[in-house]
């Protein structure tokens, strides 16, 4: 009889930033298929998702990935339901209006924090390293700090079947990025959460924590975002600059609604400096990394066919929230 470890993972009810939770189920003779992962339950009163006298919440499996970090194991990504099988309020996945027309690519930035110093890895105990800039896409022991962790995470994501498209060190020392893409909006969000889980677990053995916050170091240091690259059939096929302007104007009119779900403490990052637009302003432009929405030069060169990049989401934003409101805004703008 073969025994398999199924690590059920889900999002808790903490606000304003949800966290990951997980627990292991051991099953016999597992088929390796999602449909054979049963619905499970957990104590929602311990995760801010229920009250003590009615504490059961349900875990509905929605994605299955091999777990390279354990023997005979998978991770089971779940959405949370109430005990009567209705959608739980913390279940942001259910808010995505998916019609298989939207493609999403997320650029997930993060910072690795040394637990002994509580500063980004590579930072001296007192003072600061050399000014930022030399660390971006860098090589060498004095610049690319933490590469062993990043490479392990990359290999894990690939072996798990996630569509990770690349990695690079970022502008600030100890800051890194990876990219996840899918031709299905919900799948892209699922894989961001799976990849975050893998990174959190990998860092446990290095005495390092993952800082998802958008401004881990105050002052003249870049913050961390989760830039959302997106397109739908109209953006990919119309070849009409006016259509792109119309969509961008739609984002302008809903700027406050987007900012409200684009991550906690994002005001510390969106200052108009360090490749950002001020949080109270909205702009868009070709190849403009200081804009709210960047129109990539490749889109222009391809006859105004391609993608747009929303640079406002913070690194700690919930990708389900981000995808849901982007899809809604694009669809509403195209109706006008």
Image (spheres, rainbow, N blue to C red):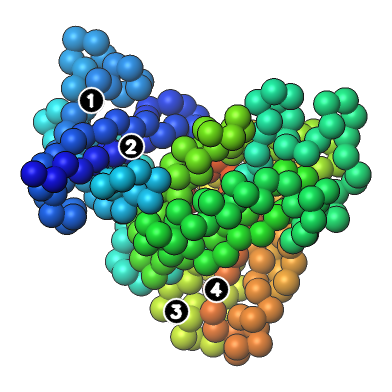
Report helix, strand or loop for mark 2: strand
Residue at 43% from the left image edge and 73% from the top image edge: 232
SS at badge 3: helix
Please name which of the two marks, 4 or 3, marks the residue nearer to the observer.
4
Classed neighbour count for the residue bearing mark 3: other residues with Cα under 10 Å, few (<14), some (14–19), many (≥20): some
Q: Which of disc 3 and disc 4 is earlier in sequence? A: 3
Tell me if residue 137 comes above or below residue 254 in the rendering: below
Q: Which residue is mark 3?
A: 234
Q: CA distance from mark 3 to mark 1?
A: 42 Å
CA separation, marks 2 and 3?
34 Å
How far across and down, in percent of the image, does residue 53 sit? 19, 10
With respect to residue 42, does 212 lie above or below?
below
Residue at image point 70% right, 55% down: 169
Q: Distance from label 1 to label 2 (Cα)?
A: 10 Å
Residue 168, can we see it? yes
Marks 1 and 2 close (CB-CB < 8 Å): yes
Instruction: Give the residue displayed 26% in from the left and 47% down from the top.
Output: 72
- N-terminal of the two: label 2 or label 4? 2
**Percent from the top left, x then y, of residue 224?**
67, 46
Q: Nearer the viewer, residue 32 or 270?
A: 32
Image coordinates of residue 25 in percent, x first then y, are 21, 34
Q: Quadrant of the N terminus?
A: top left
Residue neighbourhood size for the residue with mark 2, other residues' Cα within 10 Å, grouped as few (<14), some (14–19), many (≥20)? many
User: On residue 42, which mark appears?
Assistant: 1
The crowd level at tag 4 (other Cα within 10 Å; few <14, some 14-19, many 20+) is many
Q: CA distance from mark 4 to mark 3?
A: 10 Å
When the figure is inspected, residue 168 is found, relative to residue 304, above or below; the finding is: above
Per the image, the residue denoted by label 2 is 10
245 sits to left or right of 16: right
Identify the residue under disc 4.
Answer: 307
Mark earlier in primary sequence (3, 1): 1
Circle 2 or circle 3, nearest the eye = 2
């Amino acid at each position: 009889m073969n025994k398999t470890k199924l690590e059920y993972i889900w999002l808790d009810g903490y606000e304003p930033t949800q966290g990951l939770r997980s627990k292991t189920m051991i099953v016999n003779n597992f088929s390796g298929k999602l449909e054979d992962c049963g619905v499970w339950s957990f104590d929602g009163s311990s995760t801010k998702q229920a009250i003590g006298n009615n504490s059961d919440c349900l875990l509905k499996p929605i994605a299955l990935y091999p777990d390279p970090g354990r023997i005979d194991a998978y991770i089971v990504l779940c959405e949370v339901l109430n005990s009567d099988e209705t959608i739980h309020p913390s279940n942001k996945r259910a808010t995505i209006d998916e019609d298989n027309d939207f493609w999403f690519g997320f650029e997930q930035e993060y910072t690795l924090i040394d637990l002994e110093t509580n500063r980004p890895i590579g930072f001296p105990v007192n003072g600061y390293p050399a000014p930022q800039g030399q660390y971006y896409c860098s090589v060498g022991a004095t610049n690319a700090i933490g590469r062993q962790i990043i490479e392990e995470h990359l290999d894990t994501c690939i072996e798990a079947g996630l569509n990770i498209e690349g990695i690079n060190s970022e502008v600030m020392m100890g800051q890194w990025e990876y990219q996840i893409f899918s031709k299905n909006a919900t799948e892209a969000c699922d894989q961001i959460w799976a990849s975050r889980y893998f990174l959190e677990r990998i860092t446990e053995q290095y005495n390092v924590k993952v800082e998802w916050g958008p401004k881990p170091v105050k002052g003249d240091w870049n913050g961390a975002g989760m830039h959302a690259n997106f397109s739908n059939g109209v953006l990919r096929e119309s070849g009409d600059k006016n259509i792109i302007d119309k969509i961008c104007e739609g984002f302008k009119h809903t700027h406050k609604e987007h900012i409200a779900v684009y991550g906690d403490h994002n005001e510390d990052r969106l200052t108009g400096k360090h490749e950002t637009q001020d949080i109270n302003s909205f702009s868009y432009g070709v190849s403009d990394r200081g804009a709210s929405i960047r129109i990539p030069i490749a889109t222009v060169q391809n006859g105004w066919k391609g993608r747009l990049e929303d640079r406002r989401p913070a690194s700690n934003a919930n990708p389900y929230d981000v995808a849901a409101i982007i899809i809604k805004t694009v669809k509403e703008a195209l109706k006008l």
